Image (cartoon, helix red, strand yellow):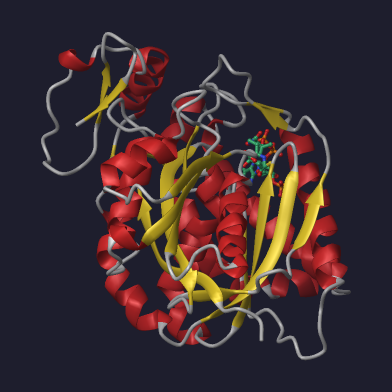
Amino acid sequence: MPISAGIDALALGLPRRHVDLRDLAEARGVPSSKYLDGIGTVRMSVAGPEEDPVTLGADAARRALRLGGVDPKEIGLCIVGTETAVDHSKPVAAFLHGLLGLPSACRVFETKHACFGGTAGLMNALDWIASGSARGRAALVVCSDIARYPLGSAGEPTQGAGAVAMIIRENPRLVSLEVGRTGSFARDVYDFWRPLDRKDALVDGQFSVQCYLDALSGAYADWKSRAEPTDLPLARTCYHVPYGKMARKAHRQRKILDGLSPEAADATFATEVAASLDFPSRIGNVYTGSLYVALASLLHAESRAIAGQRIGLFSYGSGCAAELFAGKVEESAPALVDHLDLEAPLRASERITIAEYEVLRRGDATADRRPAESTPQPAIPGEPRFLGVDSGERRVYG
Ligand code: HMG
């Protein structure tokens, strides 16, 4: 009997601010239809100096634990997938361990492979459960990132920031995943990279799109080679979403691989993918978290319609690595999704002007080195804030 393990609870953590891409298009002298329709994004979240992958991750994790009704003492594994970590040595997971009050008998580490890092953490958590190492405990997997490209570059409208926290355990309430039946693909490519001294990513944009599509074909073929005659079709598929148009291209390619014409492939998009792109179009790229933002969007919009059905998930990380896997939306999902109110952080976000956004972005270079004592204490008690560094270059959180 295969083990039932997967996503038991899920929550998002977002920066307090966002840019409307109509404002960005106007400032960059580009027709707004290029960003809204050509790229498929309406807003992008922007992190301020008091927000970083630690605070975003802690915010998401606190919400997942509290609204999911999970006691931090139940967590035996804490993995943070990120490609925008705050220290070359100390993992974001160690900061979360402290901020969340996780037990000392807990395995804690960070995973990196561009946007695939969160999925690497998720797969590790599933294997930890399947191996018996969990001994009834749950894993906390957090995907947290700030996507940055240079101001005025082609990548600028595909930025974003945020975190997704997932509680992974046996007999999950949201989505049970098919452990051990994933399809993988890897290839050494330079499509997107970020040298150690840089905050902004470098990218070979059009090549990265092709690498993503090649990786999808490879992972899908590997996944299909494991198909069984009793497998249900995929009612919905969530893709890694650097921007909405990329997911649309990915879905078309997958359907063409199934033998559909491009027109017939596109005709399935509204039913099988569109609902998963609402949150991503209002947040932007969250690198490691993007696939799981898409899953949150799907569950928020359609958990009642798809309860009991099989869904697909495709994760891509530049460099590159990809994995395609499937799961079942549990009958218990709709009631829990109502309670989790996955959209709440999106509603709380405040629109800022392009001038304010540019001031924030220019401050990025020095934000990590500002003295903690120069920062006022956070206005909202209980919300983690990055205050700066102390005289020993230790990061201080309020
Ligand atoms: P660009 O120069 O804006 O590209 O860069 P474009 O000129 O090809 O335009 C994009 C689309 O807008 C095209 O549609 C145009 O036709 C359309 P498509 O042909 O693709 O269907 N368009 C318009 N539509 C409506 N009205 C108009 C209009 N004008 C043009 N007026 C690019 C686009 C994505 C390359 C750039 O934004 C970029 O470099 N982004 C960053 C890289 C990226 O996101 N790559 C995705 C794959 S790699 C990945 O997903 C991994 C990643 O998440 C990182 C990680 O793994 O860590 C990035």
Height in image: 185 above or below 275?
Answer: above
Rendered-image quadrant of the C terminus: top left
Looking at the rendered structure, the number of numbered marks drawn on it comes to: 0
Residue 361 vertical position relative to residue 333 in the rendered view, above or below: above
Residue 15 seen: no
Residue appearing at x 44%, y 71% in the figure: 136
Q: Is residue 117 above or below residue 256?
A: above
Any part of residue 346 in sight: yes
**Along the viewing direction, whichever of 34 and 368 lies nearer the viewer:** 368
Q: Residue 8: x and y, percent?
A: 43, 71
Coordinates of residue 124 in the picture (x, y in percent) = 60, 55
Residue sitting at x 38%, y 51%: 105
Q: Residue at x 41, y 71 (%)?
A: 300
Residue at 32%, 51% (x, y): give it: 103
Which residue extends farthest bottom? 230
Q: Quadrant of the N terminus?
A: bottom right
| Rendered view: 307 above or below 349 | below
**Image position of 138 (left or right of 373):** right
Quadrant in which ligand 1 is drawn:
top right
The residue closer to the viewer here, 161 or 246, is 161
Q: In the figure, residue 376 lies in which quadrant?
A: top left
Q: Position of residue 175 (x, y in %)?
A: 51, 75
Furthest residue toward top: 391
Query: Percent from the top left, x then y, of residue 49?
Result: 30, 25
